[in-house]
Amino acid sequence: MVWGSIKNAIGLGEPELPEGPTKLPSYFPVEPKGCEKHSQKLFNCLANEATTKARDMERAGLHKSYFADVKAKATDETAAAAVSEDPTNPDFPKQGDNPLDECRTFLAYYQRCCDRQLKKRKNFILLDHVRVQDEYRYKGPSVEEAK
């Protein structure tokens, strides 16, 4: 028990997977100094496996819409038909799947590392909120360009 706590304190142990549905932390996508390896593994997983699964779910019409009044529909009718014909096939996405589950272990390592590294002085600036000055804000197309 004590040895497990020591291993976890210095980062040798396996991180605890978060309970419930997999969600990105509030500080995502920061990459603190000292967490470059874990950050890159998570970013690569999100860019490849999670995105592929999300696109497959969109093609089959199994994704959940962000807006409550919008009903999700399939973008590829052949993919939707293939999923409905064989719902037990493990290669096909299922209704209610979370694309982030593909990266669950990478996310656990990322959270553990960031929770430790963001407390350090060299990484304080990553959590600061910065207000953009008015002259640098996007104002849309100007009246002169529209003429």
Image: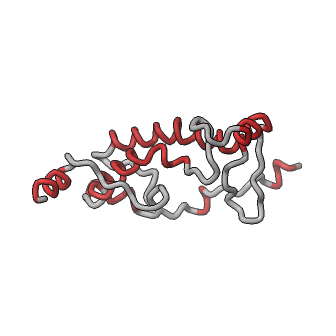
Looking at the image, residue 81 lies above or below residue 19: above
- Which picture quadrant has residue 124? bottom left
Residue shown at 43% from the left, 58% from the top: 27
Q: Position of residue 8 (x, y in %)?
A: 20, 53
The image quadrant where one finds the N terminus is bottom left
The one of 60 and 90 positioned closer to us in this rendering: 90
Q: Position of residue 121 (x, y in %)?
A: 25, 59
Residue shown at 59% from the left, 40% from the top: 53
Q: Position of residue 56 (x, y in %)?
A: 65, 39
Looking at the image, residue 63 lies above or below residue 46: below
- Which picture quadrant has residue 96? bottom right
The one of 113 and 3 positioned closer to us in this rendering: 3
Residue shown at 58% from the left, 35% from the top: 91
The one of 30 and 40 positioned closer to us in this rendering: 40
Residue that protrudes farthest toward the left in the picture:
2
Residue shown at 47% from the left, 62% from the top: 130
Looking at the image, residue 53 lies above or below residue 6: above
Q: Position of residue 22 (x, y in %)?
A: 47, 55
Indicate left or right for 1 with 128 as reference.
left
Q: How is the image coloured?
A: secondary structure
The one of 71 and 93 positioned closer to us in this rendering: 93
Residue that protrudes farthest toward the right in the picture:
147
Looking at the image, residue 64 lies above or below residue 49: below
Question: Tag count in the figure?
Answer: 0
